[in-house]
Structures are given as structure tokens and as C-alpha cells.
Image: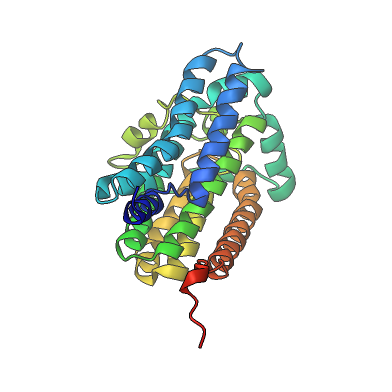
Amino acid sequence: MSPWSLESLRLLDGQRKVRLKAVDLIIIGACSLAALTLVGPARWAPGALESAAGFTLFALGPLVLRTAQAAWPRRRVLRWVADFWLLPVAMMGHELLNPLVDAFTPVLKDAQLATMDERLFGTQVSVLVSNAVPPWLMDVLMVCYYGHFIWGLVLGLVLYFHKRVAAFDEYLLALGLFFTLGYSAYIVVPAIGPRFFLLGAFSGPLSGVFVTSLLDSMMRTPVFVRDCFPSGHTGATLLVLFYSFRFSRRVFWVMLLPGIGLIVATLAGRFHYATDLVAVLPLVVLVVGAAMALSRAGSRRRGFAPARSVPMDAIVRP
């Protein structure tokens, strides 16, 4: 084989190298662990094999997509799907948690969370807030509550299409860490929230002027409802606000009021105890700190990568 042919193969191999991002490793690791658990110690739980199949698909996603992206680098849709793979994993992976909770923590922790609210605040904050909100405002808050995934996607698209690569990667890494730790907490501390556990403490059904009843009824249909502690809606909103303040002030100012409304809606809509909101604050700080540290470490590693060696016969001495 000619030297030209050898060099061409090397170049082709270099172009097709599969590169996984940090968030890809988080997805692969977390989903693989969940799948192995569901076919191992949790295999007896109802629906374990179906959930294991779903988590396996999610874990294979980054590997298949990044490999396809390397093989066909001009197919932008492959890169888009690979880069945003976290979003379907976070949305649909939530629905696969029931067998894990059944296997490891089948007893609800609502009594402990309600007791913690009493100790910290002297009252049930969700009851106090929900009963005080007028119907027209409840409509507004419930609409804000449904912006949970929308704002995260908006900021991701803004960073992505403005080619803020480092910012986008750190943001996705932070979200990946947050969802992994948050979903793990759902397994350890399952709770259904005040809307079910404290039903008799409220003055009546959740009601607004136009859309509250409809939106509230839709929130009673998800497959997995033991997702109270900590407040994922609050944590994800705080993450988006933090990263939009850092990287896209326009998004920050546009979503600030709806974001605040979303957080208030977690209490007014009876979805969470105040303890859930308090507990998510250190989790957000931990996730942001870890994402920033890992991103900086990755940048330094790329910056100090050893230069490509020069063949000895290319050195010309004077």
C-alpha cells in the first residue's frame, strides 16, 4: 500500500473518531445503572423489564448517535439529536421510575415531609398559599407551571444556535447531573405531595377562572406521581435562570417573572411541600459547582493537550 494511501486512512480514521461529551457519559452511566438494577435486584417489581428496556434504549442513544454523527459528519440532524438527547431522556425517563421505587422504597414519605413543614414554618405552606391565591392568579400560575421543560429548551436552543459551545455543554452537563440526582432522590424519598396527602386541609378543589381545572386534571394523569422531593420544577427553573443570567441575559429577563410564577405554582398548585423547595437549593448549588469544575477541567485538558509529534526525518538541521 502506498504512503499516500496509509496517510488517507489515518486521516479518515481521525475524522471518524467518536467523541462523547460529559453529559453523554452521565446519561450512559445513570441509565445503564438503572437498567442493570431493574434486571437484577429489582427484577421482581411490576414493570421492571419494560422500564429496563427503556433505560437501555436511553443509554445506547449517545453511543449510537455519536457513532452515526462521526460516520456522517455532514448530517446536521444527527448532531442535533445527539446534542439534545438529554431532553427526551429526562422527560420519558421520569415515567420509568415506578419499578425502582416499588423495589427500594415502597412506603410514602409524605408524613415526614408534612411534619418537616410544621417544624420549619409552623404551618403547611402549600395550604396557606393555595387558599390565599385568587382564581385569576391561579390561572396565571398554572400556565407558568407548565413552562417547566419549555424554558430549559429555549435556553438550550439559544446557546446552541448562537454557537456558544462551551456554555451549551456546561449547561447540559448541569441539567444532566441535576436530573440524575433528583430522580435518585425520588427513589429514596417517594412522596405524592399535598394535593393528595393533605386533601382535607384545603378549602376546596383547586380552581381558577379559565384553565386551572383542566391543567390540574392533566397533572393527575402521569404514570409516575411519587416525584415530590425535592422539587424538580424549582431546581430546573433555578438552573435555567442561573445559566441564562450568565450566558443570555435576554432569555433571563424574558423568563424571570414566568420562572418566579412557576416556583410559586409548586406551592399554590399543591404539588409540593415547602420542604421540597428548601431541599433543592443545596442540590442546585452542588450541581452548578460540579458542572463548572468539570467544564474548566475539560478546558484545561484540551488546552494542554500534547502537540502532534513530528517525524524525525522532517527535522532539518542547519
- Find residue 63 and report its image quarter: top left
- Find residue 183 and report its image quarter: top right
Residue ID at (32%, 48%): 79
- Residue 162 in percent (x, y) is at 31, 66
- Residue 127 in percent (x, y) is at 56, 41
Which scheme is used to colour this image of the protein?
A: rainbow
Residue ID at (46%, 57%): 169
Vertically, is 235 above or below 113?
below
Asked whether 125 or 318 is in front, the reply is 318
Question: How many numbered circles are shown?
Answer: 0
Residue ID at (44%, 51%): 262
- Regarding residue 249, the answer to whether it shows in the image is yes
- Regarding residue 137, the answer to whether it shows in the image is no
> Residue lying furthest bottom in this view?
318
Asked whether 122 or 80 is in front, the reply is 80
Residue ID at (58%, 28%): 34
- Residue 98 in percent (x, y) is at 54, 23
- Residue 109 in percent (x, y) is at 67, 30
Vertically, is 302 above or below 141?
below
